[in-house]
Image: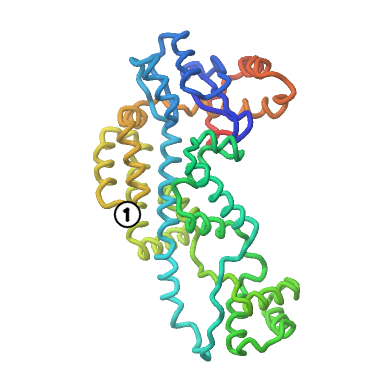
């Protein structure tokens, strides 16, 4: 089984698929444990149940089909692992920044002593939205609201609420900054900052505009003047070193090493040299991915023990979740069964839903989903809900 969204972040349903036949057997109006347990009670005889890591499905299986073998889906396991690796990379950005600064310090010319006003985090729309969302979620948490209630109140996905609950504000703001586009001025900011400091702030925007234009700048004069005004006010964003984003580093780690280009392999090596914690996360992630790809479930417990000893906190948390769901995860890393066949049907559900849901009832949507296509969907989309 797998979930799909009627409205992403608000309401979800559940699609149930016969893994052997590759066909949808039923559609449930929500993803609660009570609804799924009731369906299992009405349809006894399930021997193997493939699921993701959702606790509601686990609870329902234990209540209504305790003798069924639960199999944790491999794709979702890798997705959870990727999230733990990315969070580790977020937490250790300072290691990468420090190494980048050390490598470039000898190349920076000696400048006249001049202290610029302390830089502040620019108040962009995405940063302000992140601040307000963090404050709203934690205010409701202090009032003992549940995750689901907060998600409904703010119109967010429960995963988003959990991320804002479990992540420091500084880390969330850093992530928001990573999503901001560099813009055409970004490659020239270091030059502008140096010239501004050399002139002790006594330099015109027009002059600097002409200088960087001769060096290839293709933007407007107004953008240059705006950056100089931010320098004088102390609100200019510091020039970022050439540091790969946490998401980019995670993609290098999660790919099979033989598929990386020479440049990607070299950049990942530099990241590993800069931060022992990211190196540890990388080694653990690659070892776990090897267990998944070669179905070596018998080595899972040893991997968990290694991850619980000296690994970064997000990796320890991932290992702890695996230990809590040990039997299902071991089955997922041992048996050939998985929820992959469900993903193709989830894609079909999305198509049907977007074409008619909202103008018709759930019953009509369910009927259209249960009407089988000419060929069973045997592929996995790589996505979950939309």
User: Going by the image, does 336 lie left or right of 34?
Assistant: left
Depth check: give the residue in front, 293 or 137.
137
Q: Quadrant of residue 332?
A: top left
Location of the C terminus by quadrant is top right
Q: Which residue is mark 1?
A: 280
Percent x, y of residue 380: 52, 31
Depth check: give the residue in front, 255 or 183.
183
Residue at figure coordinates x 28%, y 41% from the top left: 304
Percent x, y of residue 184: 67, 68
| Farthest front residue in view | 143
Q: Quadrant of residue 223?
A: bottom right
Name the colouring of the figure: rainbow
Residue at figure coordinates x 35%, y 27% from the top left: 328
Depth check: give the residue in front, 149 or 28.
149
User: Around disc 1, counting alpha carbons within 10 Å, would you say few (fewer than 14), some (14 to 19), or many (20 or more)?
Assistant: some
Residue at figure coordinates x 73%, y 71% from the top left: 219
Q: How many marks?
A: 1
Percent x, y of residue 307: 29, 46
Q: Is residue 234 above or below residue 28?
A: below
Residue at figure coordinates x 57%, y 53% from the top left: 130
Q: Is residue 285 above or below residue 3?
A: below
Q: Is residue 64 above or below residue 192?
A: above
């Amino acid at each position: 089984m797998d979930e799909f969204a009627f409205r992403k972040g608000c309401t979800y349903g559940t699609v149930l698929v016969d893994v052997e036949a590759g066909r949808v057997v039923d559609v449930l109006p929500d993803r609660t444990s009570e609804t799924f347990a009731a369906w299992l009670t009405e349809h006894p005889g399930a021997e193997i149940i493939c699921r993701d890591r959702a606790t509601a499905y686990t609870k329902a299986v234990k209540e209504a089909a305790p003798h069924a073998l639960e199999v944790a889906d491999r794709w979702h396991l890798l997705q959870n692992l990727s999230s733990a690796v990315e969070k580790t990379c977020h937490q250790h950005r300072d290691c990468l920044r420090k190494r980048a600064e050390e490598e470039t310090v000898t190349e920076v010319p000696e400048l006249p002593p001049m202290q610029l006003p302390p830089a502040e985090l620019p108040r962009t729309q995405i940063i302000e939205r992140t601040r307000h969302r963090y404050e709203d979620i934690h205010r409701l948490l202090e009032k003992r609201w549940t995750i689901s209630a907060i998600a409904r109140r703010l119109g967010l996905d429960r995963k988003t609420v959990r991320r804002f609950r479990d992540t420091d504000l500084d880390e969330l703001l850093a992530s928001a900054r990573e999503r901001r586009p560099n813009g055409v001025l970004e490659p020239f900011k270091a030059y502008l900052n140096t010239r501004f400091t050399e002139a002790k702030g006594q330099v015109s925007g027009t002059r600097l505009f002409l200088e960087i234009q001769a060096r290839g700048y293709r933007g407007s004069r107004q953008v240059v003047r705006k950056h100089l005004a931010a320098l004088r006010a102390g609100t200019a964003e510091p020039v970022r070193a050439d540091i790969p984003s946490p998401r980019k580093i995670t993609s290098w780690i999660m790919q099979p090493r033989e598929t990386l280009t020479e440049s990607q392999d070299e950049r990942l090596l530099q990241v590993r040299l800069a931060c022992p914690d990211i190196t540890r996360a990388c080694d653990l992630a690659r070892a776990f991915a090897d267990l998944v790809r070669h179905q070596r479930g018998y080595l899972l417990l040893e991997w968990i023990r290694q991850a619980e000893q000296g690994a970064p906190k997000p990796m320890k948390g991932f290992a702890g979740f695996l230990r809590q769901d040990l039997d299902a995860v071991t089955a997922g890393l041992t048996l050939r069964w998985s929820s992959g066949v469900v993903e193709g049907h989830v894609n079909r559900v999305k198509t049907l839903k977007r074409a008619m849901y909202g103008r018709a009832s759930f019953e009509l949507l369910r009927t259209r989903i249960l009407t089988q296509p000419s060929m069973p969907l045997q592929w996995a989309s790589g996505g979950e809900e939309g």
